[in-house]
Amino acid sequence: MSEFKLAVQRFDPLTDAKPRLAEYTVPMREGMTVLDALLYARDYLDHSIALRFSCRQASCGSCGMKINGRPRLACYTQVEELGGEKVVAQPLDNFAIVKDLVTDLESFFTKHKQLMPYVLRSDAQELDHPTAEYLMKPEELKKVLQFTYCIKCGLCTSACPTVAMDVKFPGPQAMAQAYRYLMDERDEGGEKRLEALDTAHGVWRCHFAGSCSFVCPKGVDPALGIQLLRRHVLSGKAPRKQGEGAKVWSAPAGSTK
Amino acid sequence: MSLVGEERAKNKRGIWGWLNPYHYNLERWAYTFQRVTGVAVLLYLLGHLGDTSFFVGGPTGTGPSSSSWSFIGSIFENSFGHLILVLVVLVLTFHGVNGIRLILSEFGLIMKKPSGIEYPYRPKSLGSVQKSLVWVAIAAAVVAALWTYLVLFEGMG
Ligand code: SF4
């Protein structure tokens, strides 16, 4: 049975002054993911390895880490695709380390929330007492669909060179979501959104290194969202004003429902 | 509670995370070069402003034929000076052409429209049009530098 070397960055801020790489030998099996390898190491070689994971199928975004130098999901990276090199697992860059491979994504979620990742409406009455759904036209859905696939794994934000230097920069994930809601035909908060992005640390700090889209495991393409956002911010024109968002669906006359 | 490894636990990449493109895409390499050449161009421009100020009669100069002007000229009249000029042309051309790619990309002019996505995911923003423009910038820089080399070292042109 073939084996491979797995190096894991070990670091407990409570007791260690600096991180070190611990090496484990893991038996290879076909289709083995880096997450499988880490779990093998934790179960059979060293119970103290700290890592975070949940769904094992690239849906939850918990196991984001730096694998062989690049942010990836451990469950979505096969050992084989790393080309027979030693597998090196490290925590995501630019997020505080809790322990070993576990990072603190608090700042990431805070920035996401700051850019209002929800539909803003002016019809408060309808929101409080809904009479029907707000429906989107299929061609309108297409404009935002890919951005809705974001699982908030943080890989893009960890890969971003601007985030490495500017702590106030919202990062690719948050800005891609800003674009997603700006273009949503039900949304009426465009002006507020553009204002939030048009700051010294906002959309202008992106210089299109494209690393976010390069590492995104879900095809969200945050860089695309940000570049398209820029023109809206520059012109200051929101796609819709208050009261212009899609109306609630009403049943055609004669139908029973 | 103070943590022994408090500083390291912050895990900020800082300037190294900003400038190091290793393990990333072509556009990230272009990004790093754009930033570095940007600083180089700025330094060159300051020097250039300095030496051309002799031309308009700086502290001691009196005109194009003044001794100070010829002195400045003579600094670059050797192989080392010529090599610097070749590099300047290389850097300027890359920065300029790549800058045009960035303007076109950043205002969405050469971006494809968002749509549904298919597996395997290929980011549209890193698509072929803008990627080929990175290569155009590299090719233009090499050709311009080569031409400068031929003019300065082989006496062509
Ligand atoms: S945009 Fe992609 S990389 Fe960024 S958080 Fe969402 S799924 Fe992860």
Image (cartoon, rainbow, N blue to C red):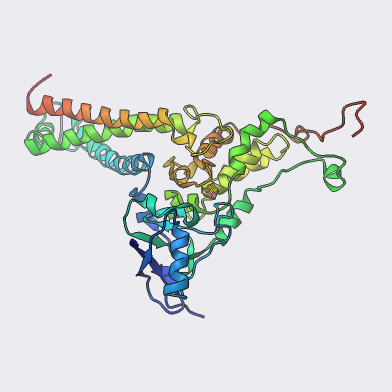
Residue B157 is at least partly visible in this image: yes
Residue B157 drawn at (x, y percent) = 13, 19
Where does the N terminus of chain A fall, quadrant-wise? Answer: bottom left
Depth check, front residue: B71 or A240: A240
Where does the C terminus of chain A fall, quadrant-wise? Answer: top right
Q: Residue at x 38, y 39 (%)?
A: B27
Depth check, front residue: B69 or B61: B69
Q: Which residue is drawn at 23% across and 33% down?
A: B90
Residue A185 located left or right of residue B110: right
The tally of labels here is: 0
Residue occupying the far top of the picture: B157
Residue A92 is at least partly visible in this image: no
Q: Which residue is drawn at 47% across and 35% down?
A: B125
Residue occupying the far front of the picture: A1
Residue A121 drawn at (x, y percent) = 76, 41
Residue A81 located left or right of residue B73: right
Residue A163 located left or right of residue B72: right
Q: Quadrant of residue A7?
A: bottom left
Q: Quadrant of residue B31?
A: top left
Residue A128 drawn at (x, y percent) = 85, 48
Residue A24 drawn at (x, y percent) = 36, 69
Depth check, front residue: A61 or B126: A61
Q: Residue at x 47, y 37 (%)?
A: B122
Depth check, front residue: B69 or A119: A119
